[in-house]
Amino acid sequence: MRAIVTGGAGFIGSHVVDALVAQGAEVAVIDSLVHGKEDNVTAAAELHVRDIREPLDDLFDAVGPEAVFHLAAQADVRVSVERPVEDADVNVLGTVRILETARKHGAQVVFASTGGAIYGECVEPAREDSPCEPLSPYGTAKLAAEEYLRSYNRLYGTRHIALRYGNVYGPRQDPHGEAGVVAIFLGSLSRGEQARIFGDGGQTRDYVYVGDVARATVSTIGHDGGVFNVGTGRETSVTELYELCARVAGSDTPAEYAPPRRGELQRSFLDTARAAESLGFMAMVDLEDGLRATWDWVGRT
């Protein structure tokens, strides 16, 4: 198959590219390289340094994609709070432009959305039909983009898919945004510095390994449209996460605790039953094993 991956030089996007190439797909990568890195892109894929906010019909004409994996985004929650117009320009209007271009070329869109930033506080694993109560412009923009996918599906009979990722971690992750806590912890440990935990460390997240996320993402090819959570279904506290990071790093350095950050979620984890039933997806990588693989990558960079 022929596929386009937007944001394919980024952390998650580059792993999706690798998974597609492993399946024999012809892959074109669109990335502005503002945050993505050329070194992340396998030689088996073709990199086009473009911005999703510019016209891309010429590239779509040349590639003739059957599927578009849309992972390009402004992904930092703090940036969205400080500069909500910029966030909406990329995450909402950029997505609409991709949808329009894909529509003209008959391509299915698989959109990388977010779980924690859309659902808000969770007292139980969030299901796809749980109330959506985003606390940041980032979460609001992702939810708005999802609504555009749904409206296109109704209006044009397309089969676009939105994937609500948990807190993704793994090799190639930069310490940007709230979801970069694993990269932040392991980076501090690799430098012999004391990591910082905001609040009492009891806040929980659903940490899912990037290899599992890439596998889930490419498994959507050809499926009917819909929304699916991609996570482990398990919550892990920040303190537990740091202890595991220290273990794989062979460090006994304690973390430093700092005052909590305003607006931070206390509990966020996902119900993944729909993805298991419809996509055949279940996370396979244990958290400690995934952290160990990430630590090995940190040691090589």
Image (spheres, rainbow, N blue to C red):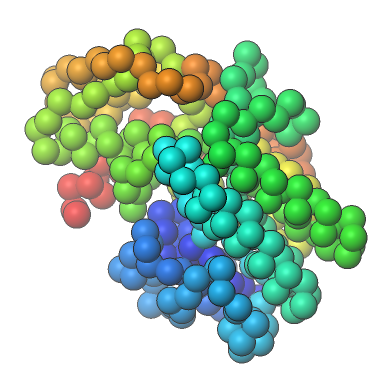
Question: On the rendered image, what quadrant is the N terminus found in?
Answer: bottom right
Q: Locate residue 153, reporting x and y percent.
A: 84, 57
The residue located at (46%, 32%) in the rendering is: 207
Does residue 73 sit above or below 205 in this rendering? below
Q: Locate residue 299, reporting x and y percent.
A: 18, 47
Closer to the camera, 216 or 107? 107
In-image side of 219 versus 45 (left or right):
right
Q: Quadrant of residue 122?
A: top right
The residue located at (55%, 34%) in the rendering is: 136
Closer to the camera, 207 or 158? 158
In-image side of 19 versus 228 (left or right):
left
Does residue 62 sit above or below 235 in this rendering? below
Say whether residue 219 is visible: no
Does residue 37 sit above or below 183 in this rendering? below
Q: Locate residue 252, reporting x and y percent.
A: 14, 20
The residue located at (44%, 17%) in the rendering is: 203
The residue located at (63%, 13%) in the rendering is: 123
Q: Quadrant of residue 33?
A: bottom left
Q: Locate residue 191, reporting x and y percent.
A: 11, 38
Does residue 186 sit above or below 195 in this rendering? below
In-image side of 136 versus 228 (left or right):
left
Q: How many marks?
A: 0
Closer to the camera, 264 or 30? 264
